[in-house]
């Protein structure tokens, strides 16, 4: 299957880089002028934003289909919360949560489904159920078998940066230079995955907003997202409803949808290829109007870091 292009298809604008694509197990996600949208389906009782809302199997499937109808280009299904201080979930429980949802979505839609997991056993079963992407917050380091599963199956992978683990990652995170440190880490992980047999065109990279970072770190990464293009892989960023939005707005209890849209517009202007969001419909509408109003005409100049 080849994922069809739509109004987000690249035109003559040279930003982002023409020809960039993300190869999946059975198709290719073409990169367009605006970011592709990865919709979030949390089949968990304790995710930071919507924990419990879609723990019911049917509710999760219906939510995934609703995100697709709103314009999601990928649906990301996860069964273990990775919020700060979250407790690990046993593999059997994670399998029980996500596999029926993934199988049902794959039966009912051609839109690629991603599994959000750091466990090789869960990834293997999810791929058997039809998943085309492994989205791993540990950058495929949390389970020594994960790289093998990804390489053998031919799925697309997303490798994310995280300092520490969910139970510990917000305990005084420190960096010499957060952008340089994350850039270096993702370069090393990209190279390691390539050496393990995962082609570069199957790899997307995520700087990990909110994963072992202070608000200042997160804002630095959001403002410098364009620099990650030097890694020559699709860049995936997940700003959706993150606590940094509440910090910026001075109200941690505020609805963060508008703040998410603001971050999405900034990331689109920087040429970020994929955005992982909860509110697919609203973000897509905002991006469409932003582009029509000329918001992408003067993107930041890409830094020449080809040696990375």
Image (spheres, rainbow, N blue to C red):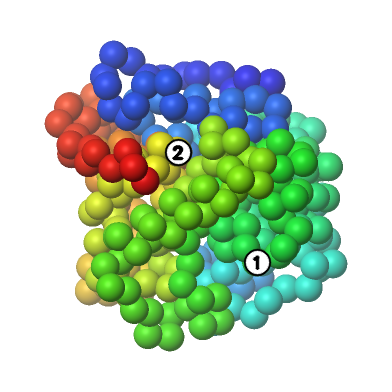
- Please tell me how many numbered marks the rendered image carries: 2
At mark 2, the secondary structure is loop
Neighbour class for label 2 at 10 Å: few (<14), some, many (≥20)?
Answer: many
Q: Quadrant of residue 136?
A: bottom right
Q: Please indicate whether residue 199 sits to the left or right of residue 155 in the image.
A: left
Q: CA distance from mark 1 to mark 2?
A: 21 Å
The correct choice, above or below, for 78 with respect to 63 in the image is below
Compared to residue 115, the image places residue 197 above or below, namely: above
**Residue 269, numbered label:** none
Q: Could you tell me which residue is drawn at 48 percent across and 55 percent down?
A: 188
Relative to the observer, which residue lies in front, 2 or 198?
198
> Left of 155 or right of it: where is 248?
left
Q: Residue furthest left?
A: 298
Q: Residue furthest bottom?
A: 171
Q: Quadrant of residue 288?
A: top left
Q: Quadrant of the N terminus?
A: top right
The answer to whether any part of residue 35 appears in the image is yes
Q: Residue at x 52, y 54 (%)?
A: 189
The kind of secondary structure element at disc 1 is loop
| Residue 281 placement (x, y as % from top left) | 44, 39
Q: Which mark is residue 233?
A: 2
Q: Residue at image x 47%, y 19%?
A: 6
Among all residues in the image, which is located at the extreme top?
12
Q: Would you call the spot at circle 1 few (<14 residues within 10 Å), some (14-19), or many (20 or more)?
A: some
Instruction: Give the answer, above or below, for where 296 lies relative to 225.
Output: above
The residue where tag 1 is placed is: 142
């Amino acid at each position: 299957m080849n994922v069809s292009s739509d109004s987000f298809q690249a035109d003559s604008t040279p930003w982002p880089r023409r020809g960039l694509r993300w190869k999946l197990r059975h198709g290719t996600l073409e990169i367009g002028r605006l970011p592709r949208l990865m919709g979030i389906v949390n089949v968990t009782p304790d995710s930071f934003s919507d924990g419990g809302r879609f723990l019911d199997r049917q509710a999760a499937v219906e939510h995934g289909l609703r995100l697709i109808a709103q314009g999601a280009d990928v649906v990301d299904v996860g069964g273990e919360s990775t919020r700060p201080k979250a407790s690990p979930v046993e593999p059997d429980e994670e399998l029980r949560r996500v596999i029926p949802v993934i199988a049902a979505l794959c039966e009912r839609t051609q839109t690629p489904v991603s599994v959000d997991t750091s466990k090789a056993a869960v990834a293997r079963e999810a791929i058997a159920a039809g998943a085309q992407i492994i989205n791993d917050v540990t950058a495929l380091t949390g389970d020594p078998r994960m790289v093998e599963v990804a390489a053998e199956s031919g799925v697309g992978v997303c490798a994310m940066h995280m300092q520490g683990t969910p139970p510990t990652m917000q305990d005084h995170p420190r960096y010499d230079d957060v952008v340089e440190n994350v850039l270096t880490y993702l370069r090393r992980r990209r190279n390691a995955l390539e050496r393990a047999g995962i082609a570069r065109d199957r790899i997307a990279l995520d700087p990990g907003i909110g994963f072992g970072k202070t608000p200042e770190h997160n804002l630095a990464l959001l403002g410098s997202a364009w620099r990650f293009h030097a890694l020559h892989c699709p860049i995936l960023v997940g700003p959706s409803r993150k606590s940094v939005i509440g910090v910026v707005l001075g109200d941690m209890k505020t609805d963060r949808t508008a703040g998410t849209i603001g971050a999405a517009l900034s990331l689109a202007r920087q040429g970020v290829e994929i955005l992982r969001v909860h509110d697919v419909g609203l973000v897509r509408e905002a991006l469409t109007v932003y582009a029509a109003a000329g918001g992408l005409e003067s993107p930041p100049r890409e830094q020449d870091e080809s040696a990375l």
